[in-house]
Image (cartoon, rainbow, N blue to C red):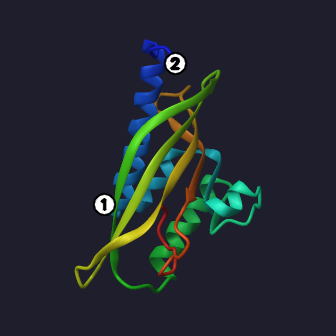
Amino acid sequence: MMGLPTLEQMQLQHAAAQVNALHAELIDDDRLEEWPDLFEENCRYSVISAENHNRSLNLAAVFCDSRGMLVDRIVSLRRANIFPAHSYRHILGPTRVKSTSGQIVTTQTNYVVLMTRNDGQTSIYNSGKYVDEIDVSGAAPRFLSKTAIFDTHLIDTMMVRPI
């Protein structure tokens, strides 16, 4: 049986949950230009199937290895991509601290992303878990890495927005 978390562990968990909630809010509210600011300059963001992740296969649906690549992704989404109008709504489970190393916190958060098309129909778009490394050394926590490991086997439209 695990003991009660310390006050420090609860503070880290709260900080991680808050940055995850803001991540979802920026995507859901279409404030995508603000989204890269949640990441360190040298970061990693990936969206990968659970099957590939569990087999240690590096083939991801989305892979970015710097904040600049995240910015490019948003610019491309706004200017070059053509896709059906839709909106996202994230439902996040509790964030759990898996480990800490100095000022780096590794967490896991389950998620479901609902997609509503312009006809008003809502469906489950993606579900899985985030595995994050969060740097809590600065004034605000920032992602060093954010990996969305999705259970969904079929993505019914081009994956254009962050998950």
Q: Position of residue 139 (x, y in %)?
A: 47, 28
| Mark found first going from the N terminus, 1 or 2 | 2
Which of discs 1 and 2 lies nearer the camera? The answer is 2
Residue 90 appears in the figure: yes
Q: Residue at x 50, y 73 (%)?
A: 160
Q: Residue at x 51, y 76 (%)?
A: 155
Q: Residue at x 44, y 14 (%)?
A: 4
Helix, strand, or loop for circle 2? Answer: loop
In this picture, residue 122 sits left or right of residue 63: left
Task: Give above or below for 100 relative to 159.
Answer: above
What residue does disc 1 label? 29
Q: Residue at x 54, y 62 (%)?
A: 151
Q: Amino acid at mark 2?
A: Met
Q: Position of residue 10 (x, y in %)?
A: 42, 21
Q: Amino acid at mark 1?
A: Asp
Q: Position of residue 59 (x, y in %)?
A: 73, 66
Task: Give above or below for 64 relative to 94.
Answer: below
In this picture, residue 52 sits left or right of residue 37: right
In this picture, residue 106 sits left or right of residue 20: right
Local packing at callout 2 (Cα closer than 10 Å; few below 14, some 14-19, many 20+) is: few
Task: Give above or below for 11 relative to 75.
Answer: above
Helix, strand, or loop for circle 1? Answer: loop
Examine the image and state in which quarter residue 117 appears. bottom left
Examine the image and state in which quarter residue 56 appears. bottom right
Cβ atoms under marks 1 and 2 closer than 8 Å: no
Task: Give above or below for 106 relative to 34.
Answer: above
Local packing at callout 1 (Cα closer than 10 Å; few below 14, some 14-19, many 20+) is: few
What residue does disc 2 label? 2
Q: Position of residue 26 (x, y in %)?
A: 37, 55
